[in-house]
Image: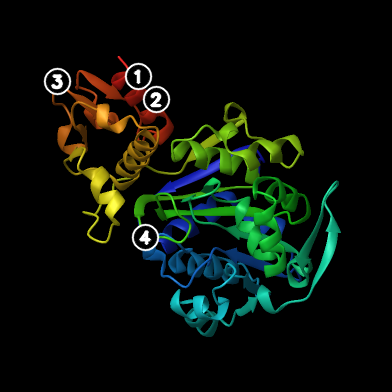
């Protein structure tokens, strides 16, 4: 696998999608039969994946089935929920206790583990013992926002590998610097991002946004840079991404990335019946007809960033999106390839939130 490659597959069937992705990248070529394979999901709180907070159980089942079909049976799921919540409760609420029984895979709560201090080349960090015993670590973050660091994805997901005392210390240090340095110690072998349903701006969930995709690659810095643009941010504006690149952990320059899209999204977005109040408010600016989830999700993230910058109120008209507008010549703002006949259109299939945001900012400032 090329370290500069980012693989993307679209859809809403997590188990099928992740198997197709793994078949394309063939991680089995990097694993030998006696290796201990660790799966590190995001179970920051005891909430189901539909909330936008935790890693898809369907995706995890698909990974386990793929690995077992390849003859690998030494598999462990490791996680430590955030301070104040119970990992054991998260395992149950998120459905991982069922996965453990069904597939014979151990669940390991890092909160109950011992730990040792490691030198990250300028910073000492305590890391849980079991994490360091894993031979092949598969990082399974959720694509979502964060109230302090703007986004949380591959790099920040390693925070579940440290004890609660260290998590508290990270917050006193401002998160960005210790997150970057932690990734000098804990180095995932492969990253598979759950971009099926994430949260708009808070890692605890509550404002779920369908993005209908799974993203994968070896470089966690490049993955996070890609995730940042999908959510409407410049990667270099996210402190820990910039610092992680400076520390030599990976590359944040997306111009050097090879984006491999394995298919195109065709799943029409749901009507956000379970969406939080903020997503429902943002959706009032959208006129959609049969919009794909990946495209619609990007637009929601872009509108959220526009709102944060105090510019949403200056948007003088609603934004059109969806396959129902294919071939139509309309005076207005369209998002995505299907609205190519509009007088003003953001190209892409699907476009990134960052591109939509830049387009809308130029429009409202005109």
Q: Going 54% across and 49% down the picture, which residue do you hit?
A: 148
Question: Looking at the image, is 102 positioned above or below residue 189?
Answer: below
Label 1 neighbour load within 10 Å: few <14, some 14-19, many 20+: few
C-beta proximity under 8 Å, tags 1 and 2: yes
| Residue underneath mark 4 | 206
| Residue underneath mark 2 | 358
Nearest the eye: 12 or 89: 89
| Residue underneath mark 1 | 362
Q: Give the Cα distance between marks 1 and 2.
A: 6 Å
Mark sitting earlier along the chain (1/3): 3
Mark sitting earlier along the chain (3/4): 4
| Residue 362: image location, x then y, percent | 35, 19
Q: Give the Cα distance between marks 3 and 4.
A: 35 Å
Is 79 on the left or on the right of 309, as rendered? Answer: right
Label 2 neighbour load within 10 Å: few <14, some 14-19, many 20+: some
What secondary structure is found at the residue carrying circle 3? loop
């Amino acid at each position: 696998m090329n370290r500069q490659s980012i693989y993307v597959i679209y859809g809403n069937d997590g188990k099928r999608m992740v198997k197709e992705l793994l078949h394309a990248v063939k991680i089995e070529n990097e694993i030998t039969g006696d290796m201990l394979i660790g799966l590190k999901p995001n179970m920051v709180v005891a909430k189901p994946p539909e909330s936008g907070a935790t890693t898809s159980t369907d995706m995890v089942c698909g990974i386990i089935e793929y690995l077992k079909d390849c003859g690998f049976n030494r598999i462990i799921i490791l996680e430590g929920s955030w301070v104040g919540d119970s990992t054991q409760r998260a395992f149950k609420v998120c459905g991982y206790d069922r996965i453990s029984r069904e597939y014979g895979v151990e669940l390991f709560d890092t909160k109950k583990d011992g730990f040792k201090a490691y030198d990250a080349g300028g910073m000492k960090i305590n890391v849980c013992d079991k994490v360091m015993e894993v031979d092949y670590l598969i990082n399974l973050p959720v694509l979502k926002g964060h109230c302090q660091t703007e986004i949380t994805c591959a790099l920040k997901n390693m925070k579940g590998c440290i004890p609660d005392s260290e998590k508290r210390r990270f917050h006193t240090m401002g998160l960005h610097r210790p997150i970057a340095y932690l990734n000098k110690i804990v180095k995932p072998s492969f990253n598979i991002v759950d971009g099926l349903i994430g949260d708009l701006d808070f890692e605890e969930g509550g404002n779920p946004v369908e993005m209908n995709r799974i993203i994968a690659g070896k470089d966690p810095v490049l993955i996070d840079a890609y995730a940042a643009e999908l959510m409407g941010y410049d990667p270099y504006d996210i402190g820990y991404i910039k610092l992680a690149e400076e520390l030599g952990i990976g590359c944040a320059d997306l111009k050097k990335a090879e984006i491999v899209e394995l298919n195109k999204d065709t799943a029409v977005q749901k009507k956000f019946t379970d969406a939080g109040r903020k997503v429902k408010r943002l959706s009032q600016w959208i006129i959609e007809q049969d919009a794909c989830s990946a495209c619609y999700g990007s637009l929601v993230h872009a509108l959220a960033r526009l709102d944060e910058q105090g510019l949403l109120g200056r948007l003088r008209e609603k934004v059109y999106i969806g396959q129902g507008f294919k071939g139509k010549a309309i005076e207005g703002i369209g998002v995505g390839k299907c609205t190519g006949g509009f007088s003003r259109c953001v190209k892409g299939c699907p476009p990134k939130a960052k591109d939509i945001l830049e387009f809308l900012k130029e429009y409202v400032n005109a």
